[in-house]
Amino acid sequence: ASGTEADGETPTITYSWSNTTTGDSLGGGSSVNLAATSAASADTIQCTATATDLNSGTDTGTADITLDNRAPSLSVLLTPDPATRYDTLSCTATASDDDDDTLTTTFTWTVEGSPEAATSTSGLTSTLSGVFLGGDEVVCLVEVDDGKSGGTASDSASVTITNQGPSISDV
């Protein structure tokens, strides 16, 4: 904020931030770090600036902003890598949402581009086994959705199945 004073003085500006949706005070200062507060999507954040001159004259102005939904963050890990055709692959997602929205997670497996049903899925982990050969590329795609507009994220990981050569046990 900026202010002027008719007597030529430079007023002192102070700030107050609040979440008008929850009624919480968010502090003072010329800016506020919303990551460190309990602000959620659709909350209205208000900044009140007060200019005070040397003779204790004041003027106040306010500005409001309604927060948009923030997309969740997601990372995916596929193990083991390297993998053989006899391994059970495990796809583990790490997901978070800065708005603390509940996330829905979807796993999609492909082997050489063709969809495959997971062997099992529980929470943020899905497994796949018994459907690949040496040289196959296996991809695990994970999608998370917070149920609000703009609230999706996706990530994938892949591994190429190691070809295991034959072995002779007796000649």
Image (cartoon, grey):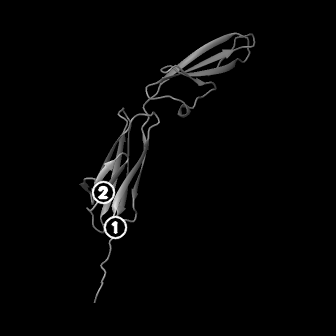
Numbered circle sitting on residue 29: none
State left or right for residue 81 relative to residue 138.
right
Q: Secondary structure at mark 2?
A: strand
For label 2, count other residues whose C-alpha is less than 10 Å away and answer few (under 14), some (14-19) or many (20+). many
Task: Give the percent coordinates (x, y) of residue 13.
Answer: 67, 20
Viewport quadrant of the C terminus:
bottom left
Q: Is residue 69 above or below residue 167?
A: above
- Pick whichever, 87 or 31, lies toward us: 87
Residue drawn at x 35%, y 34% is 147
Residue at 54% x, 19% y: name it: 63
Crowding around mark 1 (Cα neighbors within 10 Å: few <14, some 14 to 19, many 20+) is many
Q: Which residue shows up at 72% across the image and 18% down it?
A: 10
Q: Quadrant of residue 165?
A: bottom left
| Front residue of this view, candidates 85 and 31 | 85
136 displayed left or right of 71 = left
The residue that mark 2 highlights is 128
Name the image quarter holding residue 144: top left
Give the residue pinned by disc 1: 84
**Residue 52: x, y in percent?**
69, 14
At 67% from the left and 11% from the top, the residue drawn is: 58
Give the spatial CA distance, label 1 vs label 2: 12 Å
Q: Residue flagged by tag 2: what amino acid is it?
A: Leu
Residue 87: give x, y in percent of width and height.
33, 64
Number of on-image labels: 2
